[in-house]
Image: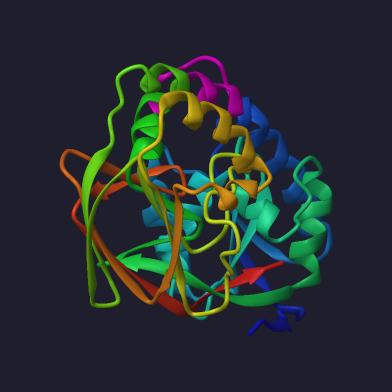
Amino acid sequence: MTSLSRVTGPDREIALLTNPTAGKGKGARARAVALSRLRSAGITVRDLEGRDADEALDLARQCVADGVDSLVVVGGDGMVHLGVQAVAGTGTSLGLIPAGTGNDVARYFDLPRKDPGAAADRVVAGRTRVVDLARSGTLHFMTVLCAGFDAIVNERANRMTWPKGQMRYNIATLAELRTFKPLPYTLDLDGTSLTLDAMMVSVGNGPSFGGGLRITEGALLDDGMLDVVIIKPMSKMALVTTYPKLFKGTHVTHPQYEHHRVRSVTVAAPGIISYADGERFGALPLTIECAPGALTVLT
């Protein structure tokens, strides 16, 4: 069930953490707009930028330890992923100024994706929502964990420097499709074992990844459950023709689509590096569980 409240007050302090290279430089431009808007609203802002992801995460965790009211990240889903590691399970809320290429989390909360000033106004308003996260060990993710063909595509796309945005994923998909074969999986779904071959297995806390690919269509952020989608073997032509349906979530009627709702899942397959929130997450096998109410988001 959705829980809404507000974070307000004259002594409010936030940490603004930016990936300046997000969205081909949109991050730096968005930070300038957001910083001005936040400070003009009387909010104390710590303006932070890490030299790399490790330093950025250290800065974020230090701010949370210092007791800031909110950590606001400027960037895409990768920055959200970083911010989640710092605030999950704490009293610090997470805000977002979208400036990435995929921006699925911004879509989840209907945040302005092309107007950093309007996104900063959402932070100023202080309206919050409590949602679930997915967790594996000490790591959390917000959107979808990819553990098959989609993970292999992510691996290739992240090595590419051109083009940017969704087209990079489309090209990586076509490149990997030439040699891809179904993978042997062993799954544990809330204690029920399943062994099968599949094109991909995706674990969703939310419904989409990769700039609107709604692979785990129907996943809810606050139901205490994970959505596990299995795409069973199909021809390469069938996969190509089904791919566009992912943007509308209409792939759910395909006979090779299978959907499970669980509290915990273990996914095992040989040679796969999983991705979550568009970031490298870990080698299979992995056990993922729902962490109900683990995140407070400024919406």
Q: Is residue 165 visible?
A: no
| Residue positioned 68% across, 50% down in the render | 97
Left or right: 69 as drawn, with respect to 183: right
Q: Is residue 253 visible?
A: yes
Range drawn in magenta = 158-171
| Residue positioned 57% across, 76% down in the render | 222
| Residue positioned 55% across, 61% down in the render | 206
What is the x, y in percent for residue 80?
Answer: 52, 53
What is the x, y in percent for residue 50?
Answer: 44, 43
76 or 176: nearer the viewer: 176
Quadrant of the snapshot with the C terminus: bottom right
112 or 144: nearer the viewer: 144
Q: Is residue 42 above or below residue 239?
A: below
Q: Is residue 298 above or below residue 57?
A: below
The outermost residue toward the front is 255
74 or 237: nearer the viewer: 237
